[in-house]
Amino acid sequence: DEFITYGLKQGHVRVLHRYSEARALLKGHTGPVSHMCFVSASIVAAGGMDGRVFVWKVQATDDENALQVDCLMSLVFSPGCEECEVLVCPFDENRMVVGVGNAVMVIDIVEKGSSVCDVDPLDPAPYGTRIGEFPLQDVATSISVSSQGVLAIGSRRGRVYVVRNVGTGEQCCQNVIIGEHVDRVDWVDRRGLMVSLKEGSKKMMFVL
């Protein structure tokens, strides 16, 4: 809770320090920022409408007017993702979940610096692993991870895919049919999942 972030029209991300006047401007995206999250207390990830994800580490310094910012990762998803919306969500302090079109994957946070890494969403190795339970015929619209590490993926085709034991040999998926475009999924506690439909027309609560 040391930092506040928000996106700007130019595709930049503004970071403010809660307890001083220090601020920073995180640059890299060539289009609007679509999703942001804190992977940990000091690591910020941002996905854009340009098929890219940037990960930065932000730290306070002795200078009350400046923050130290280091780019940890710069990922470009291709082929065919140049204008795709990229979803990001924290999984744990070392991993994040990324959604690009019909692919959802768990990406390891590894310090790569400012060098650009090209990632195939359908085969993201060595940067991470694809969630095979999400079908290629659908498009991810929202992702959320519960405090127990359960992944929920909302989709354009009106389904919610609930994936348990992510990254283990016991990974399994529960398919909840909604029937309408899912706009947002949010875990509200260990078992309660709030599902919002397109344009906020309806909200539903599921206990899973």
Image (cartoon, rainbow, N blue to C red):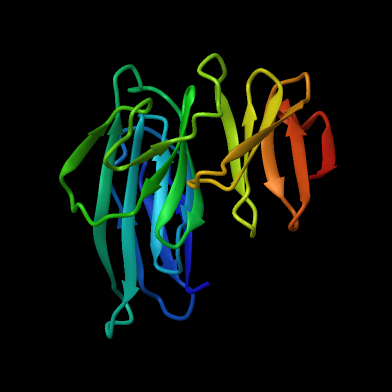
Q: Residue furthest left?
A: 115
- In-front residue for pair 98/65: 98
Total number of numbered labels? 0
Residue placed furthest toward the front: 169
Res 175 → quadrant: top right
Is 146 left or right of 133, judged from the image as shown?
right
Q: Is there any visible trace of residue 117 in the rendered image?
A: yes
- Vertically, is 172 above or below 187? above
Question: What residue occupies the far bottom of the structure in this picture?
Answer: 62
Please state the horizontal and vertical placement of residue 137, each as a whole percent of the image.
54, 14
**Residue 154 image point, x, y percent:** 64, 32
Q: Which residue appears at 38% of the width and 45% of the height?
A: 107
Work out whether 1 lies above or below 133.
below
- Looking at the image, which residue is at 64% across and 35% down? 173
Left or right, residue 164 beside residue 35: right
Identified at 61% across, 38% down, the residue is 172
From what the image shows, is residue 48 above or below residue 25?
A: above
**Residue 22 location, quadrant:** bottom left
Where in the figure is residue 179, as x and y percent of width and height? 78, 19
Answer whether residue 86 is visible to the viewer in this image.
Answer: no
Residue under the point 33% across and 28% down: 123
- Which quadrant is the C terminus positioned in? top right
State the residue lying farthest toward the top.
137
- The one of 88 and 190 positioned closer to us in this rendering: 190
Q: Position of residue 145 (x, y in %)?
A: 60, 50
